[in-house]
Amino acid sequence: MKRNILLVDICLVVLGALLFIPGIGSVRLFDWDEINFAESAREMLVTGDWFNVQINFQSFWEKPPLFIWAQALCMKVFGVGEFAARLPDAIMGIVTLLTLFHCGLKSENMRFGLLWAGMYLISFLPFFYFKSGIIDPWFNYFIFLGIYFFSRYADENKAKWAALSGLSTGLAVLTKGPVGFLVFALTFAVWLCVKRFRFSFRWKDVFVYILALCLAGGAWFILLAVTGHADVINDFLVYQVRLFQTKDAGHGGFPLYHFIILFLGVFPASIFALSTFRRSILEDETYSRNKELFRWMMVSFWVVLILFSIVRTKIIHYSSFCYFPLTYLAAWAVSRMMDGKLKFTAWHRTGLIALAVFFGVVFTAFTLFDHWKQYLIPHVQDPFAVSCMEAESSWTGFEPIIGILLIATTIWFCVRFIRHKNLGSFLPLAVGNLLFLMTALVCAVPEAEKYSQASAVEFYIERQGEDCYVQPLYFKSYAQYFYTLRQPENACEDVEWLTTGELDKPCYFVIKDAPWEREQIKADVPDAIFLGKKPGFLFFLREVPPVLDK
């Protein structure tokens, strides 16, 4: 048995490395989050200050440093760039697969562990996140461990599980802030209600949990306070509150936003998981540990989904923790289907095929975008979007086949799973999904960038090594920091001085290609020289005023 487990571990590591690492350096980082964190890591290397998180060489109080430390370490080894910025998430992808396999193995058996890790691997958004450079894969992983280890404590009453739960939750706090503990605390509170407050514990274990939580999650904040940076803590807490009260950064949305994101984005796991959302689902479950982990996963799913549906800021990765319980519920449903306790019904098959057709058609339509965008442009009201559409993509021509393959392998799986309810039946679904995802990342994402930020990023890269200021006007971006490799001496962002003051070095301005911005820059920077236009953006230069002879 141990030999088989070791073999599975090796296979998961190899598979994860082959799927998550290749190609992560071939696509530029995207504003805002990817570039934000990568730039903070780069500035740690430039300044040598690994204690303070900075953006544009100013204190950045929105995020703690754990994930940024990981990026900075990778950049120190592999150099500053997209590969190093995304490598921590790729590594976390491998760690996550191993963790889910072993959690499933401990909970039930090897088959369940493989199903859980497999569902996470082949579902769309979970896979994409491990190819990114955002903070959430680390944050969600530590929250999940905090909840999982506490479920073990509730089952066994051993202090080591309380300590591991506190440590994991503390690391979640050190990754993204107090919302990590909030998710755990709310999940625990709701679980207590579900259990009708029947929960035995020892006070010394409570102390152990709190100590581990504070050491892991509070040490950095305490050091900030004792070194005279208490203002950073205050700004950090104010920012966290603002996210719950306002549509921060323009990211608003309707109440069901995250429901739809999870249903579509965690395909195919979301279709299987729907079977578990009924009150009598645990009636035939005999093993108590299975019941308890199921309850913890179901409670954590609804806590996060409802919490971030209430929060006014709507960003796609806010509900990304739900990937853990949702793939667990999917694995649980599939396992029961294999045992004959649940049916693989017509609506399962309809849902799987319908979403496969949806994604296949959307992907194919995108690969043919240049052929039909002229019909779309007259109906687009945003001038900036219209200007971005002037970009030209370059497809090889085989990409639409991948969309067809996704549909075909999904249908093949549905037919096969009706007859043979075993792990081997999932091979067509896994292969089709992974080929689709890899093709989308390698081929489609670089083309999508051409219609968004590519023109501006290319301009910033051209400024590398030039002693100048680079300033976007009328929109927020972090790209000019990372892609110009900005140094402290070029960090000025006093817009009034840059636009009208007496400059000591040239200043480049970047604006979106929209009528009101074109008019506005004439008024704000009357001596700006127009350099040119590329899809989506206009570029200007304000030169150093000549020195007049006395």
Image: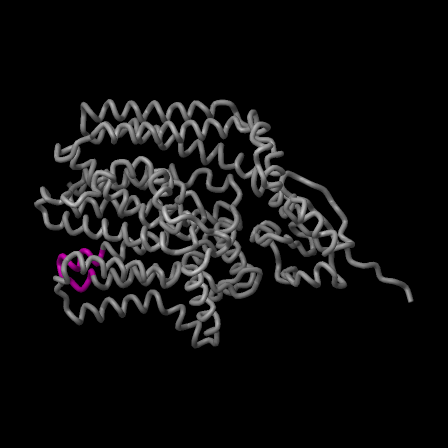
Where, by quadrant of the figure, is residue 335 drawn? top left
Q: Is residue 158 magenta?
A: yes
Say above or below: 421 vs 180.
above
The image shows a total of numbered marks equal to 0
**Residue 327 left/right relative to 90:** left
Q: Position of residue 350 (x, y in %)?
A: 28, 28
- In this figure, which colouring scheme has been used for the structure? one colour
Dividing the picture into quadrants, the one containing residue 388 is top right
Q: Quadrant of the C terminus?
A: bottom right
Residue 149: % across, % down: 22, 56
Q: Is residue 336 left or right of residue 126?
A: left
Residue 464 forms part of the magenta stretch = no
Q: For this rendering, which residue is in front, 164 or 201?
A: 201
Residue 108 in percent (x, y) is at: 15, 44
Q: Residue lying furthest right in this view?
A: 550
Residue at the image position 36 percent from the left and 55 percent from the top: 310
For the stretch drawn in magenta, what is the main secondary structure?
helix
Q: Quadrant of residue 417?
A: top left
Relative height, residue 123 to residue 544 (above, below): above
Residue name at image x 53 percent, y 50 percent: 80
Magenta-highlighted residues: 149-161
Picture residue at 24% right of the left edge, 66% below the top: 209
Q: Nearer the viewer, residue 19 or 528?
A: 528
Report whether residue 81 is seen.
Answer: yes
